[in-house]
Amino acid sequence: MRRTTNLHWPIEPYGATQRPFAPERPMMAAVAVGLTGYVRRPEWACVIYLYTDSTRTLSLDGQSLNFGFEVLTSEPDDSPAILPERFDEILVASRRHAKVLAGHDVAADLAALTAFGVDRRLPGVDSVRQQWTARQAKERGTAKVIDTAHDIGEPAVTDLAAVCEHAALKAATLAPPEGASLAVTVRQAIVRTLAIALVAARAAGRYDWTSPVDLDDLVADAAWDHLDQLDHLAEKPTDALAP
């Protein structure tokens, strides 16, 4: 499994032990996962972290956005459980420590991930899956859960691109990556998950903007070095086979 991230913390960016030299600030998280193939094997997963402010709504107008990202991508020789187990750790921490946990129509994906908890229980997947079915009844000590497909705007509008258009968020594509190169998969995963994060952040009153926000520009600004490395990795020729 490959982990592409701009985080400087070893596991998740929550708590004083993870951030010993900075004051603790409230955060929200958004997650997305891509399952492909006939058996619905996880190909990628992504989490976006946004700082929030408990006293005011943050404005994006004319501002760059400081956000954290972690993208997990499966590799051909991986055990099918490796990516779900790391994603489970992310869900455990985000459910307990984030102020808001957002996803877009992820109930079916969470249900599919439970099949990979054979050798090791997936408590984060199980707990978030249960919480997702009862989002209006917030459990004490857990994140507020927002499904951007069903909890925002018109009930009939569940397509992420349509939700983003209504929220004045724009991107070249918001489709989940499938069968793309590593660099394209990572880029599209970040863009899609950032869209979910910002839609939820606006709905929760954490962020706002009056001018259209270009998600591609935000991702390019935050992740250009990581994406550039992946592009170069794809261009690197493979070693020739010895005769």
Image: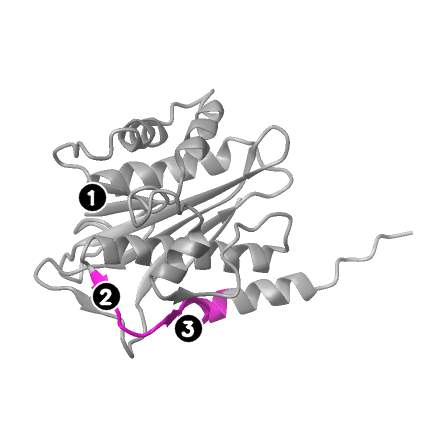
Q: Magenta residues: mostly which secondary structure?
A: helix
Amino acid at circle 2: Asp
The scheme the figure's colours follow is one colour
At 60% from the left and 28% from the top, the residue drawn is: 39
Graded by Cα atoms within 10 Å as few (under 14), some (14 to 19) or many (20 or more), the crowding at tag 1 reads: many
Of the image marks 1 and 3, the number of the one nearer the N terminus: 1
Boundaries of the magenta span: 207-226
Q: Position of residue 65 (x, y in %)?
A: 31, 69
Q: Is residue 209 magenta?
A: yes
- The residue singled out by tag 1 in the image is 97
In percent of width and height, residue 214 lies at 41, 70
Circle 2/circle 3 CB separation < 8 Å? no
Q: Is residue 20 visible?
A: yes
In the displayed structure, would residue 35 be above or below residue 233? above
Front label number (1 vs 2): 2
For the point 56% across and 54% down, the residue is 185
Label 2, on which residue? 208
Quarter location, residue 211: bottom left
Left/right placement of residue 148 relative to residue 171 reads: left
Element type at mark 1: helix
Q: Which mark is residue 215?
A: none
Of badges 2 and 3, the one in the foreground is 2
Disc 1 from disc 2: Cα separation: 23 Å
Observer-nearest of 122 and 241: 122
CA–CA distance between discs 1 and 3? Answer: 27 Å
Sequence-wise first label, 2 or 3: 2
Q: Is residue 6 visible?
A: no
Q: CA distance from mark 2 to mark 3?
A: 19 Å
Any mark on residue 221, and which? 3
Spot occupied by residue 200 in the image (x, y as percentages of width and height): 28, 52
